[in-house]
Image: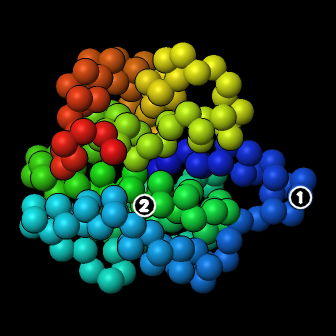
């Protein structure tokens, strides 16, 4: 599951200011720091409770050629794109977002990433529960409209993430997202409510 860059201007700033994010080593340190935050700790605990033990190498920093911030793949774990990370908050967000995908994969034995409704549901949850669309982050991305911004932002990012799924056309992604929206937006497990 590949994600839209957290910082919308990542490629622009890279080209115009030589601001190419972090090295893999720096990003590894930032991942270690994120593992000590309450939300990441909480998610890790719940993955373990659900029977999925995360090994030391479960979350890795890598250099990404594509315009993505990170990703999760079954059996491979979580990747964070060091060259698209600048601050700790971005790394925390990517780690939390991808841990939600890992949690969904863990708790639902029959989860099928080729099924557009399954993929849409996990993206809605990851977008909602990671705080990807918190208004402060939206302002940083240059989206100034605040009214209804959160759900609009999640919808935009779900569509962007699903565009990388070869099994889901744009129309199929949109239909799937609308069909599962209410159920998946309100499914905040393992949290009691969106953190
Ligand atoms: Zn995602």
Crowd band around label 2 with a 10 angstrom C-alpha radius: few (<14), some (14–19), many (20+): many
Query: Does 141 appear above or below 23?
Result: above
- Residue depicted at x 68% and y 71%: 22
Quadrant of res 99: bottom left
Crowd band around label 1 with a 10 angstrom C-alpha radius: few (<14), some (14–19), many (20+): few
Name the spot of residue 68 as percent of width and height, x first. 58, 52
Name the spot of residue 70 as percent of width and height, x first. 50, 58
Secondary structure under tag 1 reads: helix
Looking at mark 1, is its residue's CB closer than 8 Å to ligand 1? Answer: no
The disc placed on residue 95 is 2
Regarding residue 167, the answer to whether it shows in the image is no
- Residues at marks 1 and 2 touching, judged by CB atoms closer than 8 Å: no
Name the spot of residue 158 as percent of width and height, x first. 44, 33
Quadrant of res 142: top right
- Residue depicted at x 33% and y 18%: 178
Q: Nearer the viewer, residue 12 or 134?
A: 134
Regarding residue 193, the answer to whether it shows in the image is yes
Q: Nearer the viewer, residue 65 or 54?
A: 54
Q: Earlier in the sequence, mark 1 or mark 2?
A: 1
Query: Does 150 appear above or below 95?
Result: above
Look at mark 1 in the image and give the residue it sits on. 17
Q: Which quadrant of the rendered structure holds the C terminus?
A: top left
Looking at mark 2, is its residue's CB closer than 8 Å to ligand 1? Answer: no
Residue at the extreme right of the image, as rendered: 16
The disc placed on residue 88 is none
Name the spot of residue 75 as percent of width and height, x first. 27, 68
126 left or right, relative to 83: left
């Amino acid at each position: 599951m590949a994600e839209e860059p957290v910082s919308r201007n990542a490629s622009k700033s890279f080209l115009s200011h030589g601001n190419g994010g972090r090295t893999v080593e720096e990003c590894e340190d930032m991942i270690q720091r994120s593992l000590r935050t309450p939300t990441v700790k909480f998610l890790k605990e719940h993955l373990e409770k659900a029977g999925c033990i995360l090994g030391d190498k479960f979350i890795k920093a890598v250099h990404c050629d594509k315009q993505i911030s990170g990703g999760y793949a079954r059996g491979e774990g979580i990747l964070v794109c060091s060259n698209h990370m600048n601050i700790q908050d971005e790394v925390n967000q990517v780690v939390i977002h991808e841990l939600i995908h890992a949690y969904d994969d863990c708790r639902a034995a029959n989860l099928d990433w080729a099924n557009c409704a399954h993929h849409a549901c996990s993206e809605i949850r990851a977008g909602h529960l990671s705080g990807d669309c918190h208004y402060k982050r939206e302002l940083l991305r240059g989206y100034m409209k605040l009214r209804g911004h959160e759900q609009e932002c999640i919808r935009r990012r779900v569509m962007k993430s699903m565009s990388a799924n070869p099994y889901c056309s744009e129309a199929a992604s949109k239909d799937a997202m609308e069909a599962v929206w209410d159920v998946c937006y309100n499914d905040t497990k393992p949290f009691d409510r969106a953190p």
